[in-house]
Amino acid sequence: MKNRLDDNLYDPLLRESDGNAASASRESVDTQTVHSWSLSQMLERSEALRRIARFGHGSATEPVTKYPRHCTMLTFRGHDGVAELHFDFADLYFVLDGRATLVTGGEMVGGLPIGEGEYRGLRIEDGTSRELRIGDVVHIPAGVPHQILVGADRTVTCFVVRIKETE
């Protein structure tokens, strides 16, 4: 199943593209245009991601749009995520729905490169845990390992801004 935005969901974004929101999400947009999405639009889209996650590995992420030094994504998790480490990018999470535990710092176990400056691992040991709830915002600096743990019978939906912090 292809992850793509509904054609009518992000109208401001669509006006900047050829009408295909998925292609617009992969390309940089006009930096002078203001884009906005309502909470109800994001939560509606997260329901679609929830359905996609059910047929996959329990999570689904979809790019919203890309800017010159940052990009935005909508992510749904129905299970624990892998440990992540980005050397050039910070993550800014806005929790839209659900609850999760965020583990940061410590040491990534089983980390493997997946791209330039990007690693994924099995888990984080000796990190700091904090509960994430609806309305919480958290900034994870570049170079800090992190992992979202959802736990049984819980889900979490986040709007994520990935920000280039290094040159």
Image: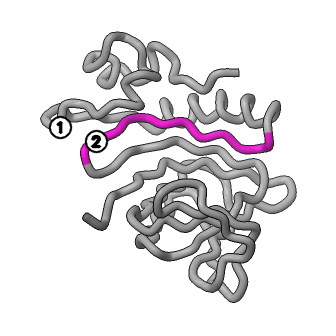
Which amino acid does the dot numbered 1 rest on? Thr
Residue at horizontal 47 percent and vertical 55 percent from the top: 94
Q: Earlier in the sequence, mark 1 or mark 2?
A: 1
**On residue 67, which mark appears?**
2
Magenta range is 57-68
Q: In which quarter of the image is residue 61?
A: top right
Residue 61 is a magenta residue? yes
Residue 24 drawn at (x, y percent): 37, 24
Tell me if residue 97 comes above or below residue 152 in the rendering. above
> Residue at point 34% right, 39% down?
66
Query: In front here: 46 or 120?
Result: 120
Q: Which colour scheme is used?
A: one colour
Label 1, label 2: how far apart the Cα atoms are: 7 Å
Query: What residue sits 57% from the left and 29% below the top?
Result: 44
As for residue 66 lying within the magenta part, the answer is yes
Magenta stretch prevailing secondary structure: strand
Quadrant of image for the C terminus: bottom left
At label 2, counting other C-alpha atoms closer than 10 Å, the crowd grade (few under 14, some 14-19, many 20 or more) is some
Q: Is residue 51 left or right of residue 136?
A: right
Spot the residue most to the left.
32
Could you tell me which secondary element the residue under label 2 belongs to? loop
**Tag on residue 8?**
none
Residue 38 vs 103, above or below: the answer is: above
Q: Mark 1 points at which residue?
A: 31
Between 44 and 54, the one lying in front of the other is: 54
Q: Could you tell me the amino acid type at mark 2?
A: Tyr
Q: Do the residues labelled 1 and 2 touch (CB within 8 Å)?
A: yes
- Residue 12 sits in quarter: top left
Q: Residues within 10 Å of mark 1 (few under 14, many from 20)?
A: few
- Measured along the vertical axis of the image, is residue 9 above or below residue 137? above
